[in-house]
Image: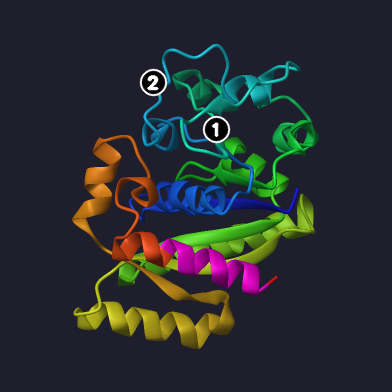
Amino acid sequence: MKRTIVFSNQKGGVGKTTCAVNLAASYAEINNKTLIIDLDPQGNATTGLGINKRKLDSSSYDLLVSEDFVEPVDTGIDNLKIICSHPNLSGAEVELVEDSDRNIKLKKKLDNYRDFDVIIIDTPPSLGILTLNGLSAAKDLIVTMQAEFYALEGLSMIVNTYEKVRSRLNPELNLLGILVNMFMQRLVVSNEVLSDLRSHFNDKVFNTLIPRSIRVVESQSYGKPIIIFDPKSVVSNAFRELLQEIEGNG
């Protein structure tokens, strides 16, 4: 296994799932065997790949609450599979609350998927057992955010959570970078927030900026990553640049 990346932000609406799915598709495009694990009960990564989460034999819910092996689902995209979300996942936190290993359930299961080159974990926009499982299992964390002032508040929360997870659950977790999504170059406020980010976090802010585009919304309605839906779009190329930046940083 070359990389295990978790996408997390306690603030919703920042396009975290879109970035997770499209980075996964970018890795698959260059022939890396890639697995997405959808830990968000909303299941947007699952539906964003055109999969009906209500018609599954097993899901990430089973990954956390049972001892059974969960077979990844074929997405129809070469080199890309997914362990899907399911509505039952919303009850997993209640079921696991008294389990002493509740925050490391996923970590203990990842050995079963070592044949994949890359594993990308999508987490819900909250701090709970599901998110902590993702942070505990991964080696790298990408925090997705928009270039707006309210997003800075959410960023401080997730960075604080990251430090706590490193000290208590997963000392190997590395903040791979802060990814600015839905960036609008023409807006003064976007550039001001980006400047503030780079002054505070320096090289932890990716150079790659993911631009806002209606084509991303269209791709989601078709159940396809933008990389597949419109491979020559400026957003698709941005995700390819992100991958190169990640790999260039080791």
Which residue type does callout 1 highlight? Answer: Ile
The part of the image, by quadrant, that contains residue 61 is top right
Q: Is residue 114 magenta?
A: no
What's drawn in magenta, residue-wise? 239-249
Of helix, strand and loop, which one carries label 1? Answer: strand
Dot 2 corresponds to which residue? Answer: 52
Measured Cα–Cα span from mark 2 to mark 1: 12 Å
Q: Is residue 192 left or right of residue 32?
A: left
Q: Residue at x 48, y 31 (%)?
A: 75
Q: Earlier in the sequence, mark 2 or mark 1?
A: 2
**What residue type is disc 2 on?**
Asn
Disc 1 marks which residue?
82
Q: Is residue 65 above or below residue 233?
A: above
* Quadrant of the rendered image containing residue 183: bottom left
Is residue 142 shown above or below 123? Answer: below
Residue 159 is tagged as none
